[in-house]
Image: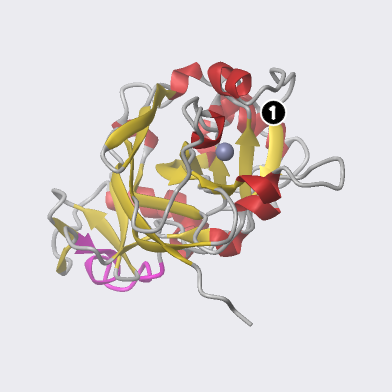
């Protein structure tokens, strides 16, 4: 099943062109809020395995798609989770998942224009998991049962702020500007994949492929990440987990490749589909 946020309403994708509105199809049993559905995800999955064809049909081919989990309580992100990326970043391979946050106000949808702050903004395609069940102390073998599904995201990063002192440096601020955590277009349930731990993700800037990998190349798999995070933090339904970016970031290139106003960034994953973003210089707020 593919879940969409179509103009703010929870929608099941039918064929990429048309979707079915969940609130009308369920006669109000489930509401229209794309974030609230994760609170009753197991119930929703059971219902969605039946007949929902009576719901209102909506167009899902246009640009009115929002984030499939637009208001998560928590957004976790993992750094240095691909060997080649750790090497290009000049950093040692981690012995345990390296965790930071993108503050939830940075989440946005799979289409539109993102403001560029001053500095050096870079792209990072990542597989993103959405939590479907409260998870505390979950072992890796049980991790997928606690995830609603996956989508694709960009861990957009302003590199100068990311690397700025005081020591020890933290990533959170440089990765949390408004719009720096776009996700979508679809939330795809794990059963749709032949192997949900082996998904192709890729992104291109102005038509040039700049990153491409398979998630089977991660140093810490998604189940291992869930085990590690939930050994400390309670994961709530609708929370996001960004799982790390592969090699090919612009900051590590010679010369550096940075995102400029009017650039086109396309971000994609198997079955999830493509996100399309462009950029503009942020206006001064002040
Ligand atoms: Zn990242």
Magenta extent: 20-33
Residue 282 percent location from the top left of the image: 50, 68
Residue at image point 23% right, 63% down: 63
Q: Locate ligand 1 by image quadrant.
A: top right
Given residues 84 and 138, the one toward you in this image is: 84
- What residue is pinned by disc 1? 97
Q: Is residue 181 above or below residue 71?
A: above
Q: State the quadrant of the N terminus.
A: top left
Q: Residue at x 38, y 71 (%)?
A: 31
Residue 53, image quadrant: bottom left
Is the C-beta of the residue carrying label 1 under 8 Å from the nearest atom of ligand 1?
no
Q: Is residue 21 magenta?
A: yes
Q: Position of residue 96 (x, y in %)?
A: 73, 23
| The one of 17 and 31 positioned closer to us in this rendering | 17
Q: Neighbour class for label 1 at 10 Å: few (<14), some, many (≥20)?
A: many
Answer with left or right where residue 63 lies relative to residue 121: left
Q: Quadrant of residue 111?
A: bottom left
- Front residue (pair 220, 157): 157
Q: Position of residue 26 (x, y in %)?
A: 27, 66
Q: Which color scheme does this rendered protein use?
A: secondary structure
Image position of 76 with respect to 36: above or below: above
């Amino acid at each position: 099943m593919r879940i969409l946020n179509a103009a703010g309403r929870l929608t099941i994708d039918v064929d990429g062109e048309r979707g079915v509105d969940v609130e009308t199809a369920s006669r109000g049993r489930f509401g229209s809020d794309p974030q609230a559905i994760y609170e009753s995800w197991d119930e929703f999955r059971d219902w969605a395995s039946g007949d929902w064809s009576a719901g209102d049909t909506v167009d899902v081919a246009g640009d009115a798609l929002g984030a499939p989990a637009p208001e998560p309580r928590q957004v976790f992100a993992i750094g240095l989770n691909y060997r080649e990326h750790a090497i290009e970043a000049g950093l040692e391979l981690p012995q345990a998942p390296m965790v930071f946050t993108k503050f939830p106000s940075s989440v946005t949808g799979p289409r539109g224009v993102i403001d560029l702050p001053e500095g050096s903004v870079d792209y990072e395609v990542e597989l993103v998991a959405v939590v479907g069940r409260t998870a505390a102390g979950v072992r890796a073998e049980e991790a997928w049962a606690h995830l609603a599904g996956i989508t694709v995201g960009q861990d957009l990063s302003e590199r100068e702020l990311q690397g700025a002192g005081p020591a020890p440096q933290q990533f959170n601020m440089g990765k949390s500007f408004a719009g720096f955590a776009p996700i979508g277009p679809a939330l795809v349930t794990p059963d749709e994949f032949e192997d949900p731990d082996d998904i192709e993700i890729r992104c291109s800037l102005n038509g040039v492929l700049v990153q491409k990998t398979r998630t089977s190349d991660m140093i810490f798999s998604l189940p291992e990440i869930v085990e590690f995070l939930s050994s400390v933090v309670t994961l709530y339904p609708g929370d996001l987990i960004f799982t790390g970016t592969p090699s090919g970031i612009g900051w590590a290139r010679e010369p550096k490749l940075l995102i400029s106003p009017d650039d086109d960034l396309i971000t994609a994953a198997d079955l999830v589909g493509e996100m399309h973003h462009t950029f503009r210089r942020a206006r001064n707020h002040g």
